[in-house]
Image (tube, rainbow, N blue to C red):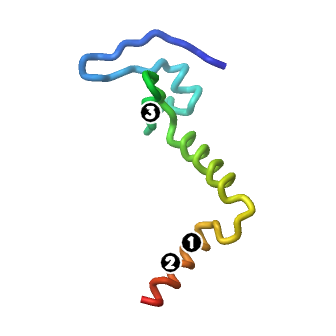
Amino acid sequence: MSSHAKGRVSKSGRLGLPAVFRKAVGLEHGGDVVIELAGREIRVRTIDEVVTQTQAIARRLTAGKSGASVDAFLAERRREAARE
């Protein structure tokens, strides 16, 4: 579902987000966001959204690959450090 609202960017670069938008994405009390520039489009996403998407990508990339976990990575780094 897509929603639209008219807004205004102040000379200092501030942009207010409508309360209904903030509530829809869990920012009714404020919070950190990631701001992306995609061509001439500005995207504002919550940190939670970005983390969830990144985790999904990581799962797809590591699916079925043995040793492709954080624990395996850290264990390998410990072995390398012990050899030094």
| Whole-percent x, y for residue 73 in the image | 56, 72
Residue under the point 37% across and 21% down: 15
Closer to the camera, 15 or 67? 67
Q: Is residue 20 left or right of residue 40?
A: right
Q: Is residue 52 left or right of residue 77?
A: right
Q: Which residue is mark 3?
A: 36
Question: Cα distance, mark 3 to mark 2?
Answer: 33 Å
Q: Which residue is mark 1?
A: 73
Residue under the point 55% across and 47% down: 51
The answer to the question of whether label 2 and label 1 lie on touching residues, with beta carbons closer than 8 A, is yes
**28 vs 73: above or below:** above
Q: Earlier in the sequence, mark 1 or mark 3?
A: 3
Kind of residue indicated by mark 2 = Arg
**65 vs 77: above or below:** above
Query: Please, which residue is most extreme toward the top here?
Result: 6
Q: Is residue 12 left or right of residue 44?
A: left
Kind of residue indicated by mark 1 = Phe
Category of crowding for the residue at label 3, using alpha-carbon neighbours closer than 10 angstroms: few (below 14), some (14–19), many (at least 20): few
Q: Which residue is mark 2?
A: 77
Task: Label 2, secondary structure: give it.
Answer: helix
